[in-house]
Amino acid sequence: MPRAAGPGRIAWPTTPPTADDRAAYRDAVPRPFWLDRRPEPRSYPALTGGTVAGLCIVGGGFTGLWAAIRAKLRAPERSVVLLEGETIGSGATGRNGGFLSSSITHGIANGLARFPAEVEALERLGLENFDGLRADLGRFGIDCDFEANGEFAVAVEPHQTEGLAAEAELLARYGHDVELLDREQVRAEVGSPTYLGAVWDRTGSAVVDPAKLADGLAAAAAELGVEIHERTRATALEEGGAGGPIRVATAGGGEVRAGRVLLATNAFPPLRRSLGRYIVPVYDYVLVTEPIPDAKLAEIGWRNRQGISDLGNQFHYYRLTDDNRVLWGGFEAVYRFGGPVDPRLDEDEDTFAALSRHFFATFPQLRGLRFTHKWGGAIDTSSRFSVFFELSHGGRVAFAGGYTGLGVGASRFGADVALDLLDGRRTEATALDYVRTKPVPFPPEPLRWAVVHFTRNRLAAADNNGGRLGLWLRTLDRLGLGFDS
């Protein structure tokens, strides 16, 4: 639902969505734009019977695909089997906005709040990972519409302008090429009447087509000799006796017996139930417009094609596609009791209506434009908002997940670290507390639902009250559990 009015609020309408707001997405296809437009992707056979591998990867999203590639590059002789329950890129990988960030801590400020002694190393490792990812795209010939045009963090309410200079200074301190823009400067870049200022970070930030990236990674993995099986849902993980191989059972009656197993299941229920304490699946929703006519786009500007997000606790993120559509998502983060992940939850009428209303408030020049696609999907949210790791089964099973919506780039780092842990390699990363510790677990239901919804309510209240945090949010900050967009 749209946010209520508060002191100094100017950005979002305070009235309910109109019939025109709802009509704008009425005929939208309820399917991710990236998946809907891709040519017929390469398919991989389901697993039938049993097979043996040095490494079995469960999950065909970004973490699993990067792990498969990196494992074969490290040891070409190693046999690698990847199991995907649906098709490559069908989960969060093909449903996200395509923002690729170098940060592996969900932003420098979040890293400082949780790992102050390690943030310099983590920022450097993140930038190295970003550069390595870009090099791998060239190495494997992956065309995923990669555009490294930087990202705007825009202030859309008066209180948000107060922190812009400090944010720019923080980014610059860690080597980022950053520019602080006032109201006139940011509107000259992108013509929205809601913009009051911005920070333009040109370092370690890009946009991609995530489906093209996933398809390219899968093709590269297959070329390296990885055995990929789609529509093969892993159902059980059993430890072999006396140091024997780990058995991964599948829904079709097949099995993989592997020396090592890497779990890369994102927001889906993990094979190790204890991991469910650390992740809640939060649903995020997206709209994509029809291509913007050249004359209309000229009214807005956006010639430098930056990715954009605003600075609210409930925030929007948006970007241009290669054919000049606007992908517009965020604001509502929906958690449902028990944390189900179900295709029936991929649509949410109230959220789509709010997104449409806010889009036309941001770009009134585009009133009359239609949305062609609408969808939602689950984000693997952890309490520290960045990837965490776990080793089990005597060090032969590793898990990497909890990216909290910023995993397009960080998944490559997560895959590398998980492989290091499985291989027993001591690296700069594996020695960090960031890797060696896990986030604070979420409480069980029904307390989990109550805490998540109360926190969400207090975040919205802070947005409505000039950004001032109430007692609950200040307490979370003191406990190191504060929210970071």
Image (spheres, rainbow, N blue to C red):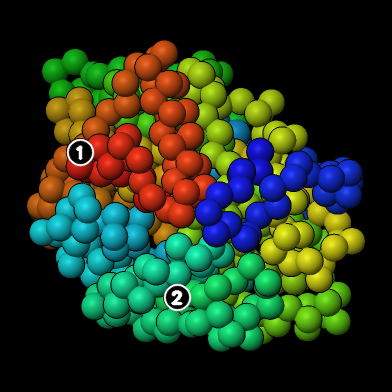
The residue identified by callout 2 is 199
Position in image of residue 353 (x %, y %): 75, 43
Residue found 25% across the figure and 37% down from its top: 475
Q: Is residue 318 positioned above or below 23 on the image?
A: below
The residue identified by callout 1 is 479
- Pick the residue in front: 184 or 21: 184
Amino acid type shown at disc 1: Leu
Position of the N terminus by quadrant: top right
Q: Earlier in the sequence, mark 2 or mark 1?
A: 2
Residue found 34% across the figure and 70% down from its top: 167
Position in image of residue 454 (x %, y %): 43, 28
Q: Is residue 35 visible?
A: no
Amino acid type shown at disc 2: Val
Position in image of residue 240 (x %, y %): 23, 19
Residue 319 appears in which quarter of the rendering?
A: bottom right
Residue found 44% across the figure and 21% down from its top: 449
Q: Secondary structure at mark 1?
A: loop
Q: Secondary structure at mark 2?
A: strand
Relative placement, left or right, of 210 versus 26 is left
- Pick the residue in front: 310 or 123: 310
Position in image of residue 228 (x %, y %): 51, 42
- Residue at mark 2 to residue at mark 1: CA–CA distance: 29 Å
Q: Are marks 2 and 1 in contact (CB under 8 Å)?
A: no
